[in-house]
Amino acid sequence: MTNKTTLWRGIKERCPKCGQGQLFQSYIKQNDHCAICHEDFSTIRADDAPPWLTILITGHIVAPWIFFFVRHEEISEFWEVFILLSLALFCVFTILPRAKGFFIAAIWLTRQKNPEREEEENSENTP
């Protein structure tokens, strides 16, 4: 399994390990573990990174439309605000869970490659 595959699984809101289990139990409420492979996600916290990425992407999508509406004044302000708010809300609600899945997968991936974690797991498994 490549890093790209693992991150893509997170974007698709699936378990980064098996790719089949759901990452979230609701919109962005994270599951404690995968229902399929039982991988533990309870210690992974994405916190501020998903909203940051969501705002960054949404800003790059909405900003050109703001410039368009400034240049073309024949469109009424009501429709400008309606279009911009609709576009921004659509982007936020679409991107946020995928960004959170991406960061959960990235954190999971970095923990899997951490040699200290492997040593801890091995020491826990030996009697």
Image: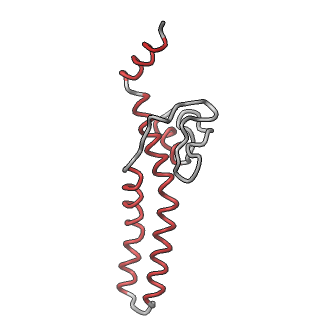
Where is residue 80? Give x, y as percent: 44, 83
Residue drawn at x 45%, y 76% as measured from the top left: 84
- Asked if 57 appears above or below 21 in the picture, the reply is below
Residue drawn at x 47%, y 62% as measured from the top left: 92
Residue drawn at x 51%, y 67% as measured from the top left: 90
Residue drawn at x 48%, y 71% as measured from the top left: 87
- Asked if 52 appears above or below 111 in the picture, the reply is below
Where is residue 71? Give x, y as percent: 35, 86
- Asked if 125 appears above or below 75 in the picture, the reply is above
Q: Nearer the viewer, residue 21 or 73?
A: 21
> Could you say which quadrant of the image residue 51 lies in?
bottom left
| Protein image colouring | secondary structure
Q: Nearer the viewer, residue 119 or 31?
A: 31
Q: Nearer the viewer, residue 113 or 107?
A: 107
Where is residue 8? Give x, y as percent: 51, 44
Q: Please count the marks in the image.
A: 0
Where is residue 36? Give x, y as percent: 64, 33
- Asked if 100 appears above or below 121 in the picture, the reply is below
Q: Nearer the viewer, residue 5 or 31?
A: 31
Single out the residue that lies furthest toward the top.
127
